[in-house]
Image: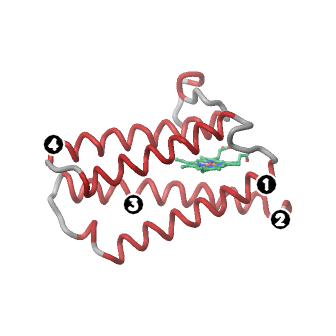
């Protein structure tokens, strides 16, 4: 599997960008345009598929680079914030009662996503607060 490190890393990064991009569009659809398509079944299944690829590649990278959540804290932060991002995202797209609340959850989810990106790029739990850069 080590031989495919670069390819797997590319798959991980591509699915990260696809996942974030899809969430950005779905959130805009729901929160700005009041559209119905973001919750259509094919769109939801596309999102689950992208996230499954993202996590599968993440697990493979973990075993290749021998770095693990709860041992290496930049990965601990990623895992914990991924859960936070998923919860915020579900309130942003569906669970929050008012449009204003959905918008708040949407913006919070995007901020968390950007922070996870900065943690990943920096390999440091403080991410942007250390490097000053998200990417
Ligand atoms: C809990 C799930 C995740 C795990 C276990 C995980 C694990 C990893 C690992 C082991 C690497 C390889 C680091 C290296 O090559 O040295 C990596 C790279 C990366 N991950 Fe994740 N990841 C996860 C989720 C995410 C998420 C949600 C994002 C973005 C929001 C993300 C963004 C990135 C990026 C941008 C890189 C490349 C960093 C670089 O340039 O070295 N990851 N991830």
Mark 2 residue's CB less than 8 Å from ligand 1: no
Identify the element where label 1 is drawn: helix
> Any mark on residue 100, and which?
4
Drawn side of residue 122 relative to residue 132, left or right: right
Report crowding for label 2: few under 14, some 14 to 19, many 20 or more residues within 10 A (C-alpha). few
Report crowding for label 3: few under 14, some 14 to 19, many 20 or more residues within 10 A (C-alpha). some
> Any mark on residue 102, and which?
none
Cα distance in 3D space between marks 2 and 1 = 9 Å
Circles 2 and 1 in contact, beta carbons < 8 Å: yes
> Any mark on residue 22, and which?
3
Considering only vertical position in the picture, is 24 above or below 1? above
Identify the element where label 3 is drawn: helix
Cα distance in 3D space between marks 3 and 1 = 28 Å
Report crowding for label 1: few under 14, some 14 to 19, many 20 or more residues within 10 A (C-alpha). few
- The quarter of the picture where residue 118 lies is top right
Please give the name of the residue rendered at 81% of the width and 47% of the height, measured from the top-left corner: 66
Q: If you read the primary sequence from the N terminus, does the residue marked by circle 2 or circle 3 appear first?
A: 2
Cα distance in 3D space between marks 1 and 4 = 42 Å
Q: If you read the primary sequence from the N terminus, does the residue marked by circle 4 or circle 3 appear first?
A: 3
Residue behind mark 1? 63
């Amino acid at each position: 599997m080590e031989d495919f490190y670069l390819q797997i890393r590319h798959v991980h990064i591509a699915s990260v960008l696809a996942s974030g991009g899809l969430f950005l569009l779905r959130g805009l659809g729901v929160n700005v345009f009041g559209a119905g398509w973001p919750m259509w079944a094919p769109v939801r299944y596309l999102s689950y598929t992208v996230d499954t690829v993202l996590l599968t590649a993440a697990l493979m990278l973990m075993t290749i680079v021998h770095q693990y959540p709860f041992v290496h804290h930049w990965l601990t932060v990623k895992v914990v914030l991924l859960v936070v991002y998923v919860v915020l995202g579900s309130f942003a797209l569906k669970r929050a009662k008012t449009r204003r609340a959905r918008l708040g959850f949407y913006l919070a989810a995007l901020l968390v996503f950007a922070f996870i990106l900065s943690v990943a790029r920096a390999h440091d739990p403080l991410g942007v607060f250390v490097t000053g850069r998200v990417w």
